Amino acid sequence: MIKTKIKEGISKALFAIAAVLCIVAVAAIFLFLITESFPAFRKIGFFRFLFGETWKPNVDDRLTETPTGQYGIWKMLAGTLVSTVGAVGIGGTLGFFTAVFLSRFCPVKLKGAFYAVINLLAGIPSVIYGFFGIYVLSPMLGFLSPNGSGSGVLATSIVLGIMILPTVTSLSKIALDTVPKGYYEGARAIGATHEQAVYRAVVPAARSGIAASLILAVGRALGETMAVTMVAGNAVNYPTSLFKSFRTLTANIVMEMGYAGELQMGALVASGVVLLLFVLLIVLAGQVLRGKNGRQRNGKKRGIAAVERWLYQLKIEKIGKTVCWASAIFTGGVLFFLIGWIVVNGAPHLSWKFVFGNYSIVDHASYTIAPSLAATLMTVAVSIAISVPLGVATAVYLQEYAKKNSKAVKIIRASIDILSGVPSIVYALFGAITFKMWLGGNVSILAGSFTVTLMLLPIVVRSTEESLLTVSDALRAGSFALGAGKVRTIFKIVLPSALPGILTAVILAVGRVVSESAPFIYTMGSSIQPMPNGYRSSGTTLAVALYCFAGEGRYMNEAFATAFVLILLVFCLNVLAQILGKALTKKWKGEENGVRKKHQRAKR
Amino acid sequence: MEYGKNISVQNAKLWYGDFQALKGIDMEISEHSVTAFIGPSGCGKSTFLKCFNRMNDLVNGCKIEGNFKIGEVDIYDKATDVNELRKNVGMVFQKPNPFPMSVYDNIAYGPRTFGIKKRKQLDEIVENSLRAAAMWEELKDRLSKSALGLSGGQQQRLCIARALAVKPKIILMDEPTSALDPISTGKIEELCEELKSTTTIVIVTHNMQQATRISDKTGFFLMGELVEYGDTDDIFNAPKRTETERYITGRFG
């Protein structure tokens, strides 16, 4: 018995240590943002910084002296807001109707394949969308543009819109699918048509889930860096017309942090803080929306009521079906075209030599992505090896040990929530300033890995918590009632039951490392290098390599082939997640499913 | 100090936060008997049952007073090991809660918790427990299959077998048949009769016929108090209190 007690004590301590480490990491990021930005805020002046119209940094400006350059981010802030609104307007609307289509209008045969493609696209690196933007969208828009250049506000909004489309569609579809059957049947039972039942009963019931998907989309559009940099034009202008070249806050950070002076760097971190504030607003909006939903029965929000009235006047149920089909066809068309474009152009240039062959920096004909593949794998290994154990242990501590309603836990959870929405470019700032310095001031694969580890932590913690929540308390009670202690219950009952969810989260995390690019550019390196000979070498991950190939414009074949490899990787990860999920479900509930399937077959 | 098969409670009081769920209950339960707790929802019968294996410890803001003894052991004493207590006082829940693992592993979970590792010994325990729960013939060929593939009634009997595997002195059942069909319910009631020879059984039930069919003694709870407690025949044929009569004749609850 004493042995058990010691085991319990040690395990609890280990979980607690993990949680503390995680909290320290979270706190470090907030502390970093505050300490690094505060002097700049003070020197420049908060309002001059936020509402100043001129961005003309002077590299020689120090934090201690009066600034000679000008540091106003107002135009870029406007750029960020306008492109986000545009993206959510395009991607959100299309995504919503596509989700309604998928959930309620789609022929059964098409459903599985369509949904799989949407999910695949949700995991595709944003540089691929940027790449598509430069070489397909911009030239197309160029024909319409008065100044002959297709890049600018419209191109950025469309690229971001396409990027968030899969996310909105996938999450809204889940929200629509989980509406209780009775709502639809009840509407049909009083004589409503299929369209009326869907738009009047099902959609309103799924409102909060749809809103959550849009909020997530806003966060993604707001924080996207590389894709935007590729199509925005990046001149510091007000986004006053559709084809005006403009710059967003994130693009500004990634373009200038490489050679920023002291005060300029402070100002860049300060704009990171502004982005963080927006994320905070979004998270709060999400919580208010979620809270409202419970109370809505009494008094509807005026805004929502107005939108609904407008929908009535529009007779949406009459045109709903058409709109749905049109959106779905458009969405499907764009997404299939995107994949097709890369496969058709990339596959012919894909060779054993290109993927695994020797790399030579002088011989342009023998550029290969073997070094990038290696760097990607190295980064995945380190970041997953650190973030998964730490994140899972933290989640276990928060869910299984910590007091449910304690204020400290609520604060920690809220901070983790905010961090999981922080744009990756903010982590890039953190990594470039701290990790790079600690590791000797040079970019290295290790610095990049640590940066992305930090980015993964909140994601792993949140998704593990979600999976732990799905484990029924009855199982925990059953284990305790048999005399098992907490540790045994956690390791034998809770974690195995949550395993499919946790594994999916791990695979998603791997996908995130593969598809990120912004956090790596100033921590790991931005030029393609020979085979790394250790974690202290610099290098590029595949996504960054694509950015390099595409950005230079001279290595299109390489760019296509790299994009193809990236899509293949994401595809494999998706398939792996599905296979693992199914295998585990089978292991735990196998027979049940088998029996059910047999019954279904028998019924037919 | 030895765990016994009899329960003795004096002046049990329990609070969930500010709400007092038990208001001073005394009860003696003798060994090898079946005792039924009846009463309307929220009367405190399940709460009282969960005091016997300290499952209420898991509830936030729960405070307990009074004297609870199982055999010679004061179960709320600081020196009492909760896990040891729960080994001696098993529990079956309202909804079957088999673990998501094989039938065999479900039954072996308890013994393994208490350090039994040898395959041969475990095989024996699994067989004996399943026999005791009258399921050996049904399940002997599918021991390695997932327990989640069983029917609801089978799952609940498996949970009883799982509880039996650690050789408890007492088994608590919290409305064990409320989620089951009549045939499965009958099987579990039969099982209660048989288990009486080896254990003491305390069962919470909403079904008064069930209480008359299987229990030796019955306690009627109302608003956190034990209104009447005595031989089942007396409670149902000649209740002393009007509340009891009104409840068993179906006038409220």
Image: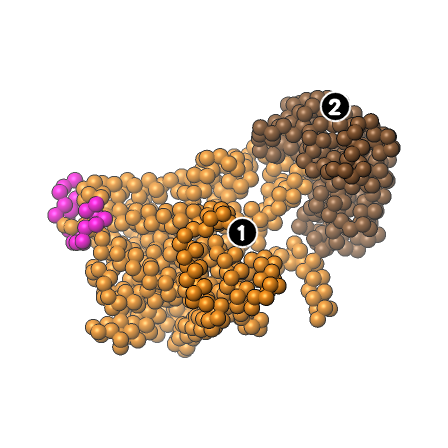
Chain colours: A orange, B brown
- Tell whether label 1 touches label 2 (CB within 8 Å): no
**Residue A59, magenta (yes or no):** yes
Camera-side residue of A55 and A551? A55
Residue on which the image places disc 2: B26
Instruction: Specify the subunit that label 1 lies on.
Output: A
Could you say whether the residue bearing mark 1 is in a helix, strand or loop? helix
Q: Residue A22 carries which label?
A: none
The secondary structure that dominates the magenta segment is: loop
Q: Residue at x 21, y 50 (%)?
A: A51
Question: Which mark lies nearer to you, 2 or 1?
Answer: 2
Q: Residue A502 carries which label?
A: 1
Could you say whether the residue bearing mark 2 is in a helix, strand or loop? strand
Residue B239 lies in quadrant: top right
Q: Which residue is drawn at 76% across and 49% down?
A: B180
Residue B161 appears at what percent x and percent y? 77, 44
Q: Which amino acid does label 2 sit on?
A: Asp
Q: In this view, does B181 lie above or below B12?
A: below
Q: Is residue B185 above or below residue A124?
A: above
Residue A587 appears at what percent x and percent y? 65, 56
Q: Residue at x 69, y 38 (%)?
A: B41
Q: Residue at x 46, y 67 (%)?
A: A316
In the image, taking residue B223 as reference, residue A271 lies left or right, namely left
Instruction: Specify the subunit that label 2 lies on.
Output: B
**Camera sees residue A238:** yes
In the image, taking residue A137 as reference, residue B169 lies left or right, namely right
Between the residue at mark 2 and the residue at mark 1, the CA separation in whole angstroms equals 47 Å
For the magenta stretch, what is the residue range? A47-68
Q: What residue type is labelled 1?
A: Ile
Camera-side residue of A366 and A143? A143
Q: Is residue B126 above or below residue A96?
A: above
**Residue A49, magenta (yes or no):** yes
Q: How many C-alpha atoms fall within 10 Å of the one at disc 2: few (<14), some, or many (≥20)?
A: some
